[in-house]
Amino acid sequence: MAELGVNIDHVATVRQARRTYEPDPVWAATLAELGGADGITIHLREDRRHIQDRDFTLLRETVTVKLNLELACVAEILDLACHVKPDQATLVPEKREEVTTEGGLDIVSNRDVVARAVGQLRDAGIVVSLFLDPDASQVDVAAQIGAHAVELHTGQYALAKGEQREEELAKLVTAGNQITALGMTLHAGHGLNYQNVKPVAAIPAMHELNIGHSIVSRAVMVGMERAVREMKSLISS
Ligand code: PXP
């Protein structure tokens, strides 16, 4: 059965909307663990739009399941990762203007930069995963530069409908087989939700799914009624 890594970035997004102390992603991580999360995933972006350095270091202290840090190949964040030592690092591309991570890393074109980052993280004892599109030439390079795992970008699958979705799923299955045949661990994520997750979770050898936006969105909805009731009771008592 695939493990679930819960990405809590958007808890921090709500906090940063007011630059205040709540909701605290550290608290959210504990609740996610109580709910059965096998891992907690955060993306410390160069622009610090949601997760802050303080979150990363505190989560390193408090998370008792796997802590997975998503990061770009940027010296400052790589150095911090090697100092704080998450259990796993997932290298992702990052553009300042993007709303979210838009595509996989291009390690065919950026082989040297990514290979150096993989080496630095490996030397620090961190498991390294690369976030890639389901593309055979990218997967080959991942194995050559020493990645432990590949996280397949499921964004195209999530956006596709009908027959096209089946085609996107087939690409994930093919790439998944290649990843495991090359001795790497298979992860997947991006755009997965309560409607589309099952076929991806059923891919043979799927080891880890990282899911954020849809879980945080659902948490807001299932928690709203109770939150309003509690405030109403304070006002009326
Ligand atoms: N995996 C990676 C590498 C990501 O960059 C993200 C988004 O931060 C996710 C998984 C989670 O995507 P979503 O929020 O769409 O579930």
Image (cartoon, rainbow, N blue to C red):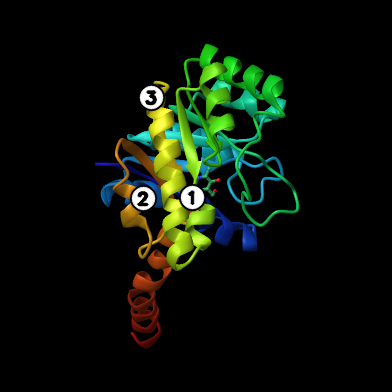
**Quadrant of image for the N terminus:** top left
Spot occupied by residue 112 in the image (x, y as percentages of width and height): 70, 19
| Residue contact between numbered discs 1 and 2, judged by CB atoms under 8 Å | yes
- Name the element at disc 2: helix
Spot occupied by residue 67 in the image (x, y as percentages of width and height): 42, 34
Q: Along the horizontal axis of the image, is 202 left or right of 175?
A: left
- Tell me if mark 1 has few (under 14), some (14-19) or many (20+) residues whose alpha carbon lies within 10 angstroms of its own: many
Residue 216 shows in this picture: no
Residue 37 shows in this picture: yes
Spot occupied by residue 24 in the image (x, y as percentages of width and height): 48, 53
Distance from disc 3 to disc 1, alpha carbons, whole Å, reads: 20 Å
Q: Based on the displayed image, in which of its 4 quarters is residue 149 positioned?
A: top left
Spot occupied by residue 199 in the image (x, y as percentages of width and height): 33, 54
| Amino acid at pointer 1 | Thr
Q: Is residue 185 above or below residue 49?
A: above
Q: Disc 1 designates what residue?
A: 154
Q: Disc 2 designates what residue?
A: 200
Q: Nearer the viewer, residue 176 or 164?
A: 164
**Quadrant of image for the C terminus:** bottom left
Asked whether mark 2 and ligand 1 are closer than 8 Å, the reply comes as: no
Q: Nearer the viewer, mark 2 or mark 3?
A: 3
Identify the residue at horizontal 63%, vertical 19% (top origin).
Answer: 115
Identify the residue at horizontal 43%, vertical 29% (top origin).
Answer: 179
Residue 181 numbered mark, or none = 3
